Image (cartoon, rainbow, N blue to C red):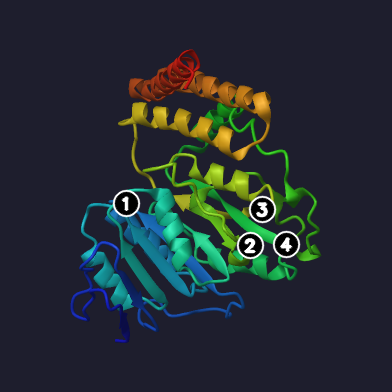
Amino acid sequence: MGIGVTDSGFHINDLQPTRETDTLSLAGQTGAYPKMGRPMGLSVSVILPTHDRPAQLGEAVDSIMAQSCLPDELIIIDDGKSPARPDIDRWAQRAGVRFIYEKRSKASLTASRNRGMAIATGDIIVFSEDDVTWPADYLQKLVELYEADTEGAVAAIGAVVAESDDNKLTRRVFDSLADALGRGKWRPRRSPARYAKLPDALRGKLFPASRLSGGALSLRSASLGEFKFDEALDGYALGEDREFCYRFGQSRAIYQAPQLKVAHLPAGRADAGMYARGRMYAENNLHIAGKSLAGGAGTYLLAYYELAGAVGLYLLWSIVTFRPRVAGFAAGIVAQLFRQGSRAVKGMLCGS
């Protein structure tokens, strides 16, 4: 079957790693996912972090393997607790691309993405997530955009993430309220994408952006240099894509391609854990404001304005949707702001 086995613990008849950081590489497989369509001139690596979502991960991988043009390699970084062997066996039998799987013991989305980038060999690095699926022509259309940029000016392209189970009107109302209440008001002043000269073939297809969604982000590997995701944003790492794009986009041209869309798989009502998510949202936003931007006091004022707006938004949303647990997100933001404010005051008083 042509299985490449590392010397650190894989066996041909046992595809389960014997150590938590071992890597499985499968090359040249054929079967249910044959390569189709025109050959792509640029090589492509897909990085897919996952955490305890085996069913959704299966849908995500199936959509990748059903592409009209397959990637050169698929890298899955698994930092969950659930065993992955049944799925790995199935995909190993069916893979038509180089397949790399790595199991990690610490849950960290940013560390998983960084590990994937360290392994990746493609000219283009495409990120996905275990709850995101692609239309069949997504990868081909994405690579065509990069190929049209013969000068290599385009460093990153992001697609639109569409909620597959959302009522469109409800989503529009929520987004309009969020924007009105300060979402995304603070961002880097510099944006090379505004001044980069794009070829005629890309005009009307790519638009300058300051932030791209991590579940629909792609990068030209030659533009990466030393850039990595900030591992200080640990665990679920809410806002990690914002932090990365704000830094990366100050010296690189990044664009949104609104005609490219991926689907976010339904996960039901995620009302549980809203308090913890609210605290993470506040903590991470202030971390990003302090680390990624050089806007001085104005930046922090806009960051606090966004947090205050989020408190109002989630309190209002909990009322109009009759979901009181949603208010936990607002409570988490307030609690984290109080905690960090108290810490700052204590530091000033104690001189530390």
Asked if residue 2 is positioned above or below residue 96 in the image, the reply reads below
Kind of element beneath mark 2: helix
In front of the other: label 2 or label 1?
A: 2
Label 2 to label 3, Cα distance in Å? 11 Å
Residue nearest the viewer, comparing 94 with 157: 157
Reading the image, the residue beneath label 4 is: 153
Q: Amino acid at mark 3?
A: Ile
The reply to whether discs 2 and 3 touch (Cβ–Cβ < 8 Å) is no
Q: Quadrant of residue 3?
A: bottom left
The reply to whether discs 3 and 1 touch (Cβ–Cβ < 8 Å) is no
Reading the image, the residue beneath label 2 is: 223
Residue nearest the viewer, comparing 335 with 67: 335
For the N terminus, the quadrant is bottom left
Label 4 to label 2, Cα distance in Å? 9 Å
Residue nearest the viewer, comparing 178 with 208: 208
Left or right, 196 with respect to 351, comes to right
Image point 41% across, 66% down: which residue?
Answer: 75
Reading the image, the residue beneath label 3 is: 254
Image point 48% across, 59% down: which residue?
Answer: 134
Q: Earlier in the sequence, mark 2 or mark 3?
A: 2
- For the view shown, which residue lies furthest in the bottom direction? 2
Q: Earlier in the sequence, mark 4 or mark 2?
A: 4
Q: Amino acid at mark 1?
A: His
Label 3 to label 4, Cα distance in Å? 9 Å
Category of crowding for the residue at label 1, using alpha-carbon neighbours closer than 10 angstroms: few (below 14), some (14–19), many (at least 20): some
Q: Earlier in the sequence, mark 2 or mark 1?
A: 1
Mark on residue 51?
1
Asked if residue 243 is positioned above or below residue 290 in the image, the reply reads below
Image point 48% across, 62% down: which residue?
Answer: 117
